[in-house]
Image: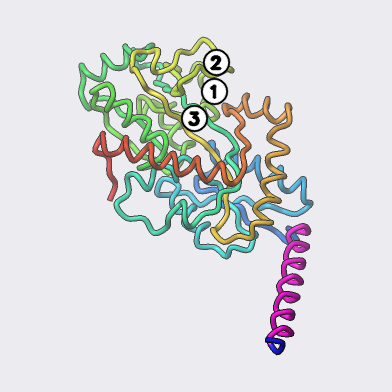
Amino acid sequence: MSKKLPAVFAAAVTAAVSAFSFSAAAQQYPVKTVRFIIPFPPGGPTDIMGRMATDILAKATGQQFVPDNRGGAGGNIGAELCAKSPPDGYTLCMITAAQGVSPAIYKKMSYDPVKDLAAITLMANLPSLLTVHPALPAKTVKDLVALAKAKPDALTYASTGNGSSPHMLMEMFKFMTGTKMVHVPYKGQAPAVLDQLSGQVQLAFNTAISVIPQVEAGRLRAVAISSKERFPPMPDLPTVEEGGVKGYDGGSWQGVGAPAGTPPEIIRRVNSILVAELKTPATRELMLKRGGIVSANSPEEFSAYLKAEIARWTKIAKAANISVD
């Protein structure tokens, strides 16, 4: 027994020194440039939120956090790249509503959003505006439903890709109203909005952050807000439920994550920086102007939220018979 004591003691000392060194390194993090993957093209809500996060982190740490836009497959290309990156803290990424939907509709995925990504914080919930091109003779939800039922598959709607929040919100709308419309997927919100502005597609669920300026300028018409409650910056705009679709409630969200296995000390450091800034009155107000409602929660809370979103959309996907190969 006595012969084992030195070895046990040595192991304990080694572990303690390693833990101390690891903790000290985490406190000094980052000591070099951090890649920040944004799984959608420039110009859309994920890009806007991602660049807000990189600005906050760069200002707080004095290091560069470089945005790396990797769009495609409804946000899954960039998310997979993040999941498969070294878990050393020098790759971070946006985790979006797409990661809450994809497991519900894709038959095969090369990564698991829950197991392969580490949640850091949910930055904000982003209600979506149901918008139509001004040439479309629909000013209310009831108008739109009546028009869609009168002309099945005549209306086209844009999304940011199969399984994206705009896609699922419209599929849920179609299922709950018994309407048929044609889906036109894009690689990001910016190109989708551009085609809606030109009249190439007639309608879409767009995150408020991406289309409020176009609505205010009269280039798009807002018909309703997707959330259960009205949106504070647009208090006169009714919800989809108020428009006659009982029980309708949905929207997008944006958060920050990292590859699974990233040291918890680094996860907590990034979380503390982001949450502290997001909770300031100035940032809350800025977020609201950009169409978002600040969440700023813990890694554990964000992880639980992601799991709940996957469960919710799985039920909706099964009910509406939505799947993507």
Q: Residue at x 53, y 19 (%)?
A: 231
Separation of marks 1 and 2 at Cα, in angstroms: 9 Å
Query: Which residue was labeled with disc 3?
Result: 207
Separation of marks 1 and 3 at Cα, in angstroms: 9 Å
Query: Is residue 83 covered in magenta?
Result: no
Query: Which residue was labeled with disc 1?
Result: 212
Q: Residue at x 29, y 52 (%)?
A: 107
Q: Earlier in the sequence, mark 1 or mark 3?
A: 3
Marker disc for residue 234: 2
Kindly indicate whether the residue at mark 3 contacts the one at mark 1 (C-beta within 8 angstroms).
no
Q: Position of residue 84 (x, y in %)?
A: 50, 62
Q: Classify residue 132 by image quadrant.
A: top left
Vertical comparison of 223 with 280: above or below: above
Classify residue 15 as left or right of residue 35. right
Q: Position of residue 240 (x, y in %)?
A: 40, 18
Mark 1, secondary structure of its residue: helix
Q: Earlier in the sequence, mark 2 or mark 3?
A: 3
Q: Earlier in the sequence, mark 1 or mark 2?
A: 1
Q: Residue at x 32, y 45 (%)?
A: 105
Kindly indicate whether the residue at mark 2 contacts the one at mark 1 (C-beta within 8 angstroms).
yes
Q: Amino acid at mark 1?
A: Ile
Classify residue 168 as left or right of residue 89. left
Kindly indicate whether the residue at mark 3 contacts the one at mark 2 (C-beta within 8 angstroms).
no
Mark 2, secondary structure of its residue: loop
Classify residue 238 as left or right of residue 64. left
Q: Amino acid at mark 2?
A: Met
The region drawn magenta spans 4-28
Q: Position of residue 29 (x, y in %)?
A: 74, 58
